[in-house]
Image (cartoon, rainbow, N blue to C red):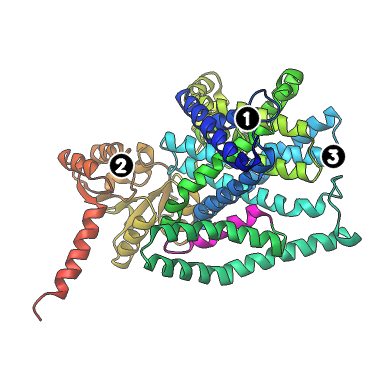
Amino acid sequence: MDHSVTLISTIAAGFGLALIFGFIAERLKLSALVGYLVAGILIGPTTPGFVADVQIASQLSEIGVMLLMFGVGLHFSIDDLMAVKRIAIPGAIVQMTFATLLGMYLTHWWGWSLGQGLIFGLALSCASTVVLLRALESRGMLDSMNGKITVGWLVVEDLLTVLVLVLLPPLAHLLGGNALTNNGEPLWQTITFTLLQVAGFIVIMLVIGKRLLPWLLWHIAKTGSRELFTLAIVSTAIGIAYVASALFSVSFALGAFFAGMVMRESEFSHRAAEESLPLRDAFAVLFFVSVGMLFQPAVIMEQPMNVLAVVGVIVVGKSIAAMAITLAFRYPLNTALIVAASLAQIGEFSFILAGLGMSLGLLPIEGMSLILAAALISIAINPFLFSAIQPFKQWLVGISKVASDLEKRTDPFAELPMSTERKYLEGQVVLVGYGRVGKRIANALQENDIPFVIAEENREIVENLRKKGIPAVSGNASEPSVLIQAHIANASMLVIATPDTIDVRNMVTTAKLLRPDIHIVLRTHNEVESELLKNENVGQVFLGEEELAKGMCKFILAQYAPK
């Protein structure tokens, strides 16, 4: 082959086959990631026919890693994580530990070393952000409480994996890898120096980068050039990742993650995410293709039981651990099943971790092949796991009293305490949702001494409200029991401050059944939905864009009013 076109042929073959097999995967109701991995297998050195350049594909995949992690940083929200921290943090730690130990037990049985088993187990413990978000979005669950718990759980997993990526190189020698400590220095000094370097990079990013990047984007945006803005985003992501690696010995992944995290603080974060999305998606495809090129299909024929065992750890072992933890935190069976199904797969972080393990001599090529085979299978069956949640739950509740009790278990925050003052339970406002809009409404009611009770899905928010002396109940207000606990029968008004209008009709039906003369106020962002709700005469409907326009017009007209 003419080496002058090796890069072009690798990209052309990678993109072309990824498109074909990604499309086939989607038509089969599988994740497109399966198609991308299959494309990589077909152009890899272990299958006949065209063989792409592995070295070039590897460097392209590094860019893919940077842009993937940059995207994760752009969407990383401390607030979202803190909202579910009580279950997400311990849940992720315990589940990752359990899965890692299961992976280590398997490799010990196969005769691998302790270091090899540790990397293998860690690679099995972290789920794919891409697969999870796609699954939740397709089912309209991303903004639900169950979705927020699962995403928060995965964010903690991602952060823990990033920490592993940072600490792995200095620990490689101790674990039996081929990396050496710095000039024979004690291990604790090497780890301390590594952590200081990472801390120094983080401080610089949070102190200098937080000021510099928004300033830079502001001046570039003022030029009006879309091309320059996109270039600024991409060069920032890749440039910071490279500088982090060259000067601070920080991985490309961590550098790009913090670049995205800092840029999120800018007012241009949404535009940055939008402008960089096509390029991030393109290089992410090349990343998955390059990972597929490392796969050895023979492992499925030669070691079928090993592959099944690894899939068992991911789909069964991780799911059982996630279910047990979720139920231990007194969440219902349905939530536990959704969390379990969401985490029963592995993806991009597993590949990044396995790739680093291979480069450090801590993971054999057989390990990467097993991880890839298990990833393909777990990603492929993940949609079917989600589809099986409701039938499985109904079957389980039908045959087991324990499962029935778990589904109906009492939430300690689902009932108002007996000590709630009587003034809150007569003629009060029932406010559904305590988000950005709900919080402002609650503050206005409080300032005007209007009694109210809040119905909110997030248990931690309810707990914090009660500590402040504000009456609140936990649960989905579309369920009659939640509004009953908020004493809707005695309320004068129901205010639905959540943007999701799917369950509005259930709330309205319950409210009007128990209090026919109740006033109902709700919000929506959809003009068609707004018209339908108004035609059904459910109550006073506020359309977000319409109210914003009214506010702006009022200000504008006030400036031109006669003095």
Q: Which residue is mark 2?
A: 501
Can you give x and y, in whole percent of width and height, for residue 182 in the image? 85, 60
Q: Amino acid at mark 3?
A: Leu
Query: Most prominent secondary structure in the magenta stretch?
Result: helix
Secondary structure state at the residue bearing disc 1: loop
**Does 262 appear in magenta?**
yes
Q: Is residue 278 above or below residue 556?
A: above
Q: Amino acid at mark 2?
A: Thr
> In which quadrant of the rendered image does the N terminus lie?
top right
> In which quadrant of the rendered image does the C terminus lie?
bottom left
Can you give x and y, in whole percent of width and height, for residue 504 in the image? 29, 40
Q: Is residue 381 left or right of residue 361?
A: left
Q: Which residue is mark 1?
A: 43
Q: Residues within 10 Å of mark 3 (few under 14, many from 20)?
A: some
Can you give x and y, in whole percent of width and height, for residue 234 in the image? 52, 56
Q: Amino acid at mark 1?
A: Ile
The residue that appears at 46% across and 62% down in the rendered structure is 468
Mark whose residue sits in front, 1 or 3:
1
Q: Is residue 422 visible?
A: no
Q: Is residue 404 above or below residue 165?
A: above
Q: Along the line of sight, which residue is nearer the eye, 523 or 395? A: 523
Secondary structure state at the residue bearing disc 3: helix
Earlier residue among tags 1 and 3 = 1
Earlier residue among tags 3 and 2 = 3
Query: Which of the numbered marks, if any, corresponds to residue 114?
Result: 3
Secondary structure state at the residue bearing disc 2: loop
The residue that appears at 39% across and 58% down in the rendered structure is 226
